[in-house]
Amino acid sequence: MDHHLGRDRLPAGLDGVHDDPRTPRRRRGDGPRLLVPVPVPQPEHGAGGVLHGVPLHGADRRDHRPRRRRRDLGVAQGRSLAAARGGTDCAVTGGRGGCADDAVTDGSAARGVARRGITRRIIAAAGALLALAALAVIWTARLSLPHDLYVSELGADGMPTAAAFRVALLLLVAGGALVAIACRGIRSRARLLRRWTPTVSLLVSCAFFLLASQVPCTAGCPVPAPGSPLFTWQDFTHTSAAVIAFGAAAVAMLQCGFALGHPVLAVLSRVSAIAVAGIAAVGGLMSVLSFYSWMGSRFEFTATTIGLGWVAVLGLSVALERRRSQE
């Protein structure tokens, strides 16, 4: 052996006997065949009974993925899966009560998810009620006046309904913000509308309605046309804020009109978006052109009613929906 291997000696404790590739080929009639022991790696048992060095197939391969499943599903769910397969993680913990801790963790996580779902539904219901209250205040103020006027004129300087109109806008802002927070899980499937969530659109709308409530228009709410002798920055600020707020609300309606997993809400939102955009546009043009202004004011009240009603419906749909399995 030393003659063929030279100074390259093999260690002791070898696991098998094989032909040494460094040994010259034996020719017929050269004498007995020379066998040299060569180490062969053998599978070893690692933590959890896993065989290192052996290809895993089928069920063995599925059982050998606890770490990846924990990363994908969460630590608590990964531990529960491992415990359900036979208590592998309990064995690894060395009898320190690992599985009992996992059960407590899973129970705490489930209770936390349930509490969050209840809180979200309460917030949505509160927002819907505030939106309905705002609608009731607006119509109460409108019916207290004998003549037709636009919605913004309810809060104009010197109007007896100015305080009620400001309260109505603040109720709308609070209710819309609560509904926006509660429906943050709603996503749109339309490519252009899914760049941001309906929550963002509703919060933008509420912010501009808040600005409109703090900056009312002047008496009569004249159209703030540039160059007009009746132009004031107060009217321009109020009108611009109201238009942007209505536009952001219409975008939120369109986003919910293509919402995933909410078929009824999607249909109602599409109808509301088309109605609000069309009626408000017609009413605004009639106001600008001074063409049947009394009818334009009624169109504006109709669009406002549809918009506030949609906010209430959105909040109630979130408050009454069943808790999904992933929660």
Image: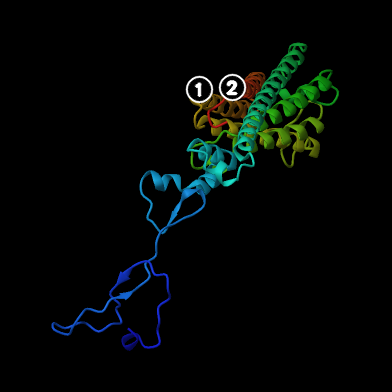
Tell me the tag on residue 264.
1
Three-letter residue code for mark 1: Val
Q: Position of residue 196 (x, y in %)?
A: 59, 42
* Quadrant placement of the C terminus: top right
Packing grade of label 1 (10 A; few <14, some 14-19, many >=20) is few
Q: CA distance from mark 1 to mark 2?
A: 9 Å
Q: Which mark is residue 317?
A: 2
Towards the viewer: 87 or 159: 87
Is 305 in front, or is 23? 23
Return the x and y of residue 143 as percentages of the image width and height. 74, 11
Q: Is residue 266 left or right of residue 208?
A: left
Is residue 83 visible from the viewing direction of this image? yes
Position of residue 152 relative to residue 84, above or below, is above
Q: Secondary structure at mark 1?
A: helix
> Where is residue 248 drawn, in percent x and y?
63, 35
- Image coordinates of residue 278 in percent, x first then y, are 56, 27
Find out whether the residues at labels 1 and 2 contact each other: C-beta distance under 8 Å.
Answer: yes
Taking the image as shown, residue 140 lies to the left or right of residue 291, namely: right
Sequence-first disc among 1 and 2: 1
Q: Residue furthest left?
A: 28
